[in-house]
Image: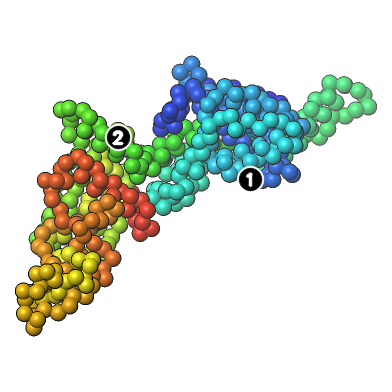
């Protein structure tokens, strides 16, 4: 077994250690000769840890196949000193593979004693909102501008490791024959075109090292997930309400470039971090109002440490539909519904029993689409519409509590709707 120590100059770009300290977390990655623990071997385990104000890397390499148990033993001794184990899809491959190996060697399984943080699993529920084509480690690295020296995949390295074992054995045998110097022995034929075990080892270690170092850098993609986390904005909201005279973080403004019935309400919030690359999420609602189809776009724009939510605002007339329509009469001439207690004073020829789609009052005002907690006292263009609105009162919305609820209702809608589209902004 070979043990390789390396001091790194990399930086962790996301506070993945919280609520622990940097010294409490350990990044790890394994390399294997196949996908099945029954028929394959672990030939390399690598870890990165923070010590003496810098990141350190340690790799245990099986220079012989029968060293697998030894490198697992060293790895298990290492993780005893840490509180969180960080990995990329380790829950799906690395950890189950090691657990099966523990059964083979009758070793205690250590993972129940340490907190597990799988970056891949954190990203997976948000894959449609993330600015990457897929969640492969190299794809995420490429998006964030990371350049690899390593050009191999894990599958490619299976043959590289087999070549290493062959070259290593050949070199040992060749050296042994030369050292004996017997007259009846001749050196084995050797071709300089065959990579040496040293060169092959470098390839194997490099791939594992770049996977590990990449975890420090790609951790910044987790900031995109934070943009859809209620806890982020709840913390900001609390800082506003609990700090007297604090700098105003929320800003509201209605933006209208034309005389169109559709304009935008912009909500701007300053967040305590910077997104790696600016991004723009958009969800377009189509609603017919007065015979005209209107496309109303809800947008979330993240740039540096600013998040802007653009909410479509409709200026015009909408209808409020009463639920208990059997208790109302519809007045065709006035195009409105009134309660029976009042309708008794209206001549019968001017009133008819209201139906669900005629039991309404009309109102002219400024409205925004309604979701979540906002879906109270809603207005619609037509009864059968799936999209409803609430009347917008800027004076009330500027109160922190109202603004927080409004902001989160739209954030949650964008997060959970399959129609939300992402585009990058430069």
| Alpha-carbon span between mark 2 and mark 1 | 44 Å
- The reply to whether residue 362 is in sight is yes
Give the residue drawn at x 53%, y 34%: 116
Give the residue drawn at x 24%, y 43%: 404
Q: Quadrant of residue 113?
A: top right
Tell me the quarter of the image containing the C terminus.
top left
Q: Is residue 130 above or below residue 180?
A: below
Say few, some or many: other residues with alpha carbon within 10 Å of mark 1 (under 14 / 14 to 19 / 20 or more).
Answer: few
Q: Check the image and tell me how it is coloured.
A: rainbow
Pointer 2 or 1: first along the chain: 1
| Relative image position of residue 414 (x, y in whole percent) | 32, 52
Give the residue drawn at x 66%, y 37%: 98
Say few, some or many: other residues with alpha carbon within 10 Å of mark 2 (under 14 / 14 to 19 / 20 or more).
Answer: few
- The reply to whether residue 191 is in sight is no
Q: Quadrant of residue 258?
A: bottom left
At mark 2, the secondary structure is helix
| Relative image position of residue 259 (x, y in whole percent) | 9, 60
Tell me the quarter of the image containing the N terminus.
top right
Q: Mark 2 highlights which residue?
A: 235
| Relative image position of residue 3 (x, y in whole percent) | 65, 24
- In the visual, does 137 lie left or right of 379? right
Of residues 21 and 203, which is closer to you in this image? 21
Give the residue drawn at x 17%, y 64%: 320
Q: Mark 1 highlights which residue?
A: 155
Of residues 177 and 192, which is closer to you in this image? 177
- In the visual, does 93 lie left or right of 169? left
| Relative image position of residue 174 (x, y in whole percent) | 81, 28
Q: Is residue 159 above or below residue 209?
A: below
Q: Is residue 205 above or below residue 319?
A: above
- In the visual, does 405 lie left or right of 60? left
């Amino acid at each position: 077994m070979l043990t390789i120590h390396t001091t790194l100059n990399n930086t962790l770009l996301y506070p993945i250690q919280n609520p622990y300290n940097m010294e409490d977390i350990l990044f790890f990655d394994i390399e294997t000769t196949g996908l099945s623990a029954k028929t394959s071997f672990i030939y390399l385990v690598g870890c990165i840890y923070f010590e003496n104000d810098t990141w350190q890397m340690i790799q245990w390499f099986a220079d012989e196949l029968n060293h697998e148990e030894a490198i697992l033993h060293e790895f298990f001794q290492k993780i005893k000193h840490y509180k969180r184990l960080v990995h990329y899809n380790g829950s799906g491959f690395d950890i189950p593979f090691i657990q099966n190996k523990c059964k083979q060697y009758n070793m205690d399984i250590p993972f129940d004693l340490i907190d597990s943080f799988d970056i891949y699993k954190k990203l997976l529920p948000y894959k449609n909102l993330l600015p990457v084509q897929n969640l492969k480690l190299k794809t995420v690295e490429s998006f964030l501008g990371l350049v690899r020296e390593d050009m191999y995949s894990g599958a490619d390295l299976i043959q590289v490791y087999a070549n290493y074992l062959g070259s290593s054995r050949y070199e040992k045998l060749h050296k042994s024959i030369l050292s004996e110097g017997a007259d009846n022995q001749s050196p084995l034929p050797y071709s300089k075109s065959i990579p040496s075990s040293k060169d092959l080892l470098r390839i194997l270690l490099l791939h594992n090292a770049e996977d590990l170092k990449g975890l420090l850098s790609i951790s910044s993609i987790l900031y995109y997930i934070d943009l859809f986390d209620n806890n982020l904005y709840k913390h900001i909201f609390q800082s506003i309400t609990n700090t007297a005279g604090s700098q105003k973080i929320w800003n509201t403004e209605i933006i209208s470039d034309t005389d169109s019935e559709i304009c935008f309400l912009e909500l701007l919030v300053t967040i305590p971090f910077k997104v790696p690359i600016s991004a723009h999420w958009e969800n377009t609602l189509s609603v017919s109002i007065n015979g005209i189809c209107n496309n109303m776009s809800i947008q979330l724009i993240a740039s540096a440490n600013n998040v802007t939510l653009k909410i479509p605002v409709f200026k015009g007339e909408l209808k409020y539909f009463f639920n208990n329509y059997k208790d109302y009469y519809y007045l065709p001439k006035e195009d409105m519904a009134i309660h029976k207690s009042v309708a008794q004073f209206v001549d019968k020829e001017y009133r008819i029993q209201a139906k669900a789609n005629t039991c309404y009052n009309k109102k002219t005002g400024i409205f925004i689409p309604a979701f979540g907690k906002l879906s109270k006292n809603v207005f619609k263009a037509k009864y059968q519409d799936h999209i409803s609105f609430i009347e917008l009162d800027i004076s009330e919305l500027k109160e922190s509590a109202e603004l927080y609820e409004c902001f989160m209702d739209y954030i949650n809608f964008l997060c959970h709707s399959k129609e939300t589209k992402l585009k990058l902004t430069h």
